[in-house]
């Protein structure tokens, strides 16, 4: 089993749609969780950290379920500019960051 | 915010030559930097962890003699692809982590990436 798994995608959604990405991780010692966004041929950039209580940043909402070892990202009112690959990143305590394979999103006009 | 700069952005070289890629943390000291490789439509794969003042730690399957890493200062790590071959063509990305207390991970900042094409 891979350390971090994500929805395989791609997700093709119309503008204004709500889309949710799921991520599971295998290492129960994981301490920090992040969602990164990567545009084509660019470096990943931090979208948001994921906190135990869940957190929201504008149209983006991240949830963490430690018991199920599950992370989610919800994007509301999707924009064309949201088209990218979304990477789930997990950091076990004292270890390196582990990247999921990414889920590609295409928002269509 | 913290910035990591990577150079060059693009490099095209002939097979058999060596290519050096630089990674700099511009406004924070990074005792540890990470080097990744990403093939088209695939995720980032960690190649090695670069430690300032000591030898790099390589991931399984990564040839340390082919991918030379030097981390001579707290703000600079270099990756040299020696005797490059077409199969080494890839997107190489470095990153550095900002520090947080208590051993928790700070944000991981990435360089802009270097696209290597070996002819």
Image (cartoon, coloured by chain):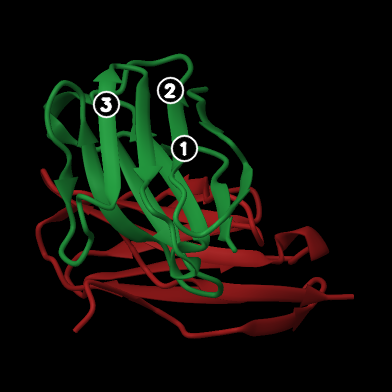
Q: Residue at x 48, y 17 (%)?
A: B26
- Mark 1: few/some/many CA within 10 Å (<14, 14-19, 20+): many
Determine the chain carrying the residue at label 2: B
Q: Nearer the viewer, residue A91 or B38?
A: B38
- Please state, as top left, top right, bottom left or bottom right, where the C terminus of chain A lies in the image: bottom right
| SS type, badge 3 | strand
Residue carrying label 1: B21
Residue carrying label 3: B71
Q: Residue at x 71, y 66 (%)?
A: A83
- Say if B9 sits above or below B118 in the image: above
**Total count of labels:** 3
**Disc 2 to disc 3: CB gap under 8 Å:** no
Cα distance, mark 2 to mark 1? 14 Å
| SS type, badge 1 | strand
Residue A77 on image: x %, y %: 74, 66
A25 relative position to B23: left or right: left
The quadrant where residue B88 appears: bottom left
The quadrant where residue B63 appears: bottom left
Chain letter, red: A
Q: Earlier in the sequence, mark 2 or mark 3?
A: 2
B41 relative position to B18: left or right: right
Residue B30 on image: x %, y %: 30, 23
Cα distance, mark 2 to mark 3? 12 Å
Q: Which numbered marker is on residue B25?
A: 2
The quadrant where residue B60 appears: bottom left
């Amino acid at each position: 089993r891979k350390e971090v798994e994500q929805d395989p995608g791609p997700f093709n959604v119309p503008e204004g749609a709500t889309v949710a990405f799921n991520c599971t991780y295998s290492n129960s010692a994981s301490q920090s969780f992040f969602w990164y966004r990567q545009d084509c041929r660019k470096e990943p950039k931090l979208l948001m950290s994921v906190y135990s209580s869940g957190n929201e940043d504008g149209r983006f909402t991240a949830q963490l379920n430690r018991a199920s070892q599950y992370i989610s990202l919800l994007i509301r009112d999707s924009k064309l500019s949201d088209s990218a690959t979304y990477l789930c990143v997990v950091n076990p305590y004292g270890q390196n960051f582990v990247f999921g394979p990414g889920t590609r999103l295409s928002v269509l006009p | 915010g913290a910035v990591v700069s990577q150079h060059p952005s693009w490099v095209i070289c002939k097979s058999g030559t060596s290519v050096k890629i630089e990674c700099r943390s511009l406004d924070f000291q990074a005792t540890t930097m990470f080097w990744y490789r990403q093939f088209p439509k695939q995720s980032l794969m960690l190649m090695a962890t670069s430690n300032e003042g000591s030898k790099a730690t390589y991931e399984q399957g990564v040839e340390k003699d082919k991918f030379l890493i030097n981390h001579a200062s707290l703000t600079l790590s270099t990756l040299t692809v020696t005797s490059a071959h077409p199969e080494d063509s890839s997107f190489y990305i470095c990153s550095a982590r900002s520090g947080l207390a208590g051993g928790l991970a700070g944000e991981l900042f990435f360089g802009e990436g270097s696209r290597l094409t070996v002819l």
